[in-house]
Amino acid sequence: MSPLLFEARGRDFKWQFLSLGPDGEIGTGDEQSLGNELVVPSNASVTLFLTSEDYVYTLDVPDGRIAVAVPEMVHTIQFVSPAEGTYEFHTDPLCGLRYFHDDLLGTLRVTSSFAGGSLANLR
């Protein structure tokens, strides 16, 4: 199964997730906003293309690795989604005030199935 591809964009101390559009490219205007909750099936290969609109952020994925989002740059991180459940995407806006921003970060919701193979069916 091909990896699920998403953009993770840091802005205003929170993550916004976007599904890539038909062209499979970032920043072409055909992406679909998913808000700050990313929903994927369990045991799926996930690729996140990280960028930022304002600050440098770090993002901890469920397996404990850390990636960096920097304005005007794109970094990639891949992981396999864990068991069904809801997980926090821990982040640090590198301003020294992380705990003031914790309620605005992002979540990963893992479902037990990928109904019909469509992202729309997971919302």
Image: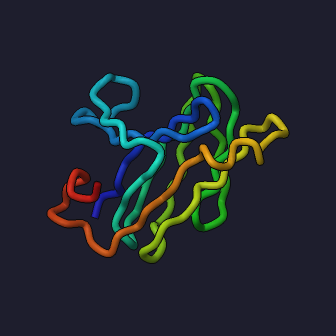
Location of residue 56 (image quadrant): top right
Q: Is residue 93 above or below residue 62?
A: above
Q: Is residue 105 above or below residue 70?
A: below
Q: Which quadrant holds residue 98?
A: top right
Q: Position of residue 58 (x, y in %)?
A: 68, 44
Total marks placed: 0
The image quarter containing residue 64 is: bottom right
- Closer to the camera, 121 or 26? 121
Residue sticking out furthest to the right:
96
Extreme residue toward the left, this view = 116
Can you give x and y, in whole percent of width and height, for residue 103 in the image? Answer: 63, 48
Q: Residue at x 66, y 42 (%)?
A: 68
Answer with left or right where residue 60 lies relative to residue 82.
right
The residue positioned 61% from the left and 30% from the top of the image is 12
For the point 78% across and 38% down, the residue is 94
In the displayed structure, does residue 1 sit left or right of residue 110? left
Q: Residue at x 75, y 42 (%)?
A: 100
109 left or right, relative to 99 = left
x and y percentages locating residue 23 in the rendered image:
25, 32
Q: How is the image coloured?
A: rainbow
Q: Quadrant of the N terminus?
A: bottom left
- In the rendered image, which quarter contains the C terminus? bottom left
Q: Is residue 102 above or below residue 69?
A: below
